[in-house]
């Protein structure tokens, strides 16, 4: 095949391509078109097939699958980080977090946690999630918000106590048996 020559004998010689463009956005393009911030004809050219994917927070079960995928991918890139695992509390925290940055934010959280943590277990404090705590992000009525607060208190005390339940109970001013009752009610 000859090299591409835009003009052959003074006549324009167009080159054809079978390339396809795959693009993603977190903007509502129809609104942007109406506001004059996005060209309608460009949208028409790009929008051959539009796939709308719900945000990560609405896809139950995807967070855990993706976290293991990203952790394995990072371990392949940096073999020194092999063997890292996520504690059950860290997985619960990730499942509750709304991920406003969607899958990209989850990937960054996982990579930072794997890179920063010097032990083999990644805990909720290693995740470095944004400042809004889990109980502030819970939607629902009184009982749902109260349960979220109880879970957060139990997880935080367990983490501070190094997963020692007797110490976590002392920190919360509970008896060991009360702590075990609440743990089985809110964390199982």
Image (spheres, rainbow, N blue to C red):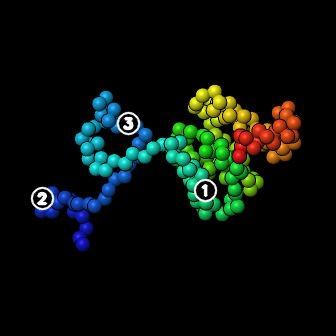
N-terminal label among 1 and 3: 3
> Viewed as shown, does residue 113 lie left or right of 165?
left
Q: What is the x, y in percent for residue 21?
A: 34, 53
Q: What is the x, y in percent for residue 81?
A: 68, 59
Mark 2 lies on a secondary structure that is strand
Answer whether residue 97 is visible to the viewer in this image: yes
The residue where tag 1 is placed is: 68
Answer whether residue 102 is visible to the viewer in this image: no
Tell me the CA gap for discs 2 and 1.
56 Å
> Viewed as shown, does residue 151 lie left or right of 16?
right
Mark seen at residue 28: 3
Q: What is the x, y in percent for residue 97?
A: 60, 40
Tell me the CA gap for discs 3 and 2.
42 Å
Figure label count: 3
Quadrant of residue 76 within the rendered picture? bottom right
N-terminal label among 2 and 1: 2
Mark seen at residue 11: 2
Q: In this rendered view, identify the residue nearer to me: 12 or 31.
A: 31
Residues at marks 1 and 3 touching, judged by CB atoms closer than 8 Å: no
Q: State the quadrant of the N terminus.
A: bottom left
Mark 3 lies on a secondary structure that is loop
Tell me the residue at 65%/48% (across/down).
Answer: 91
């Amino acid at each position: 095949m000859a090299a591409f020559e835009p003009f052959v004998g003074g006549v324009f010689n167009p080159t054809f391509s079978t390339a396809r463009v795959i693009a993603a956005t977190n903007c509502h393009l129809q609104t942007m078109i109406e506001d004059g911030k996005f060209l309608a004809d460009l949208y028409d050219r790009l929008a051959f097939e539009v796939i709308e994917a719900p945000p990560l927070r609405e896809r139950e079960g995807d967070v855990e699958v993706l976290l293991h995928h990203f952790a394995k991918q990072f371990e392949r890139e940096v073999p020194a980080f092999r063997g890292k695992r996520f504690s059950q509390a860290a997985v619960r925290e990730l499942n509750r977090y709304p991920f406003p940055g969607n899958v990209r934010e989850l990937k960054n959280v996982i990579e930072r946690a794997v890179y920063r943590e010097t032990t083999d277990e990644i805990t909720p404090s290693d995740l470095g999630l944004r400042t809004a705590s889990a109980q502030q992000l819970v939607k629902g009525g009184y009982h749902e918000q109260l349960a979220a607060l109880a879970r957060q208190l139990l997880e935080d005390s367990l983490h501070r106590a190094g997963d020692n339940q007797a110490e976590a109970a002392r920190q919360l001013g509970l008896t060991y048996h009360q702590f075990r009752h609440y743990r089985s009610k809110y964390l199982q």
